[in-house]
Amino acid sequence: MTCEEVIARLPDELRAKIGTNARATVDSHHARLIDHKRQELQDLELEHQQAVEDLERTLRGEIGKDYSLQVPEWQESASPTRESMVLAVLSDFSDQDFIRRDVEARIVEVWPEVEPQTEPEANDFTSGIAALMRDLVEKGQLQVRKGESRFEPRVYGVKDI
């Protein structure tokens, strides 16, 4: 029986409660990310406002000749996407077999800021990495060497392409 079939057989009240809890978990996870992005946007708006004010003062001659107009360069986010992190660490495993947890540990070692802090974050992180690795198997970049059933960990190997 699939997960969907099990859920479909649950009483409506229990299904609603599960849905409410799941939505709360998703909302909680994304609330922190949204707040972070809002703060980044506010910081960027302040930088923009300051740059425009400096430009206007320079054009009016209010700022001396030794002042140089500084426009901050755009920078990429400090943390790359999960996919780029997985792809980046796979080269560390090119000559050995490995499991998903090895990849997760290496990612956290290289990018400590992405380490999950709560159980929902850890579940999201783990399932996201697992999904990416399944996609890489389907694309032919990884191969499953052991652990085809869901009851034993999958052992992966990087394919030579």
Image (spheres, rainbow, N blue to C red):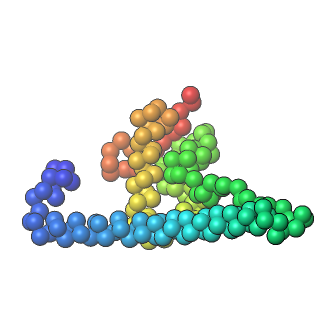
Single out the residue that lies furthest toward the top.
161
Indicate the position of residue 103 as horizontal and vertical percent values.
Answer: 53, 51
Q: Residue at x 70, y 67 (%)?
A: 53
Q: Residue at x 50, y 34 (%)?
A: 141
Indicate the position of residue 59 as horizontal and vertical percent values.
Answer: 78, 61
Vertical relation: 137 (above or below) 27? above
Q: Looking at this view, is 64 or 144 the one in front?
A: 64
What quarter of the picture does the C terminus occupy?
Answer: top right
Indicate the position of residue 142 as horizontal and vertical percent values.
Answer: 49, 37
Q: Is residue 54 left or right of residue 30?
A: right
Vertical relation: 94 (above or below) 120? above
Indicate the position of residue 84 as horizontal and vertical percent values.
Answer: 55, 47
Answer yes or no: is residue 115 visible: no
Answer yes or no: is residue 92 visible: yes
Vertical relation: 151 (above or below) 145? below
Q: Residue at x 62, y 54 (%)?
A: 76
Q: Residue at x 64, y 63 (%)?
A: 48
Residue 107 occupies quadrant: bottom right
Single out the residue that lies furthest toward the right.
66
Q: Is residue 161 left or right of residue 147?
A: right
Residue 127 occupies quadrant: bottom left
Question: Number of labelled discs?
Answer: 0
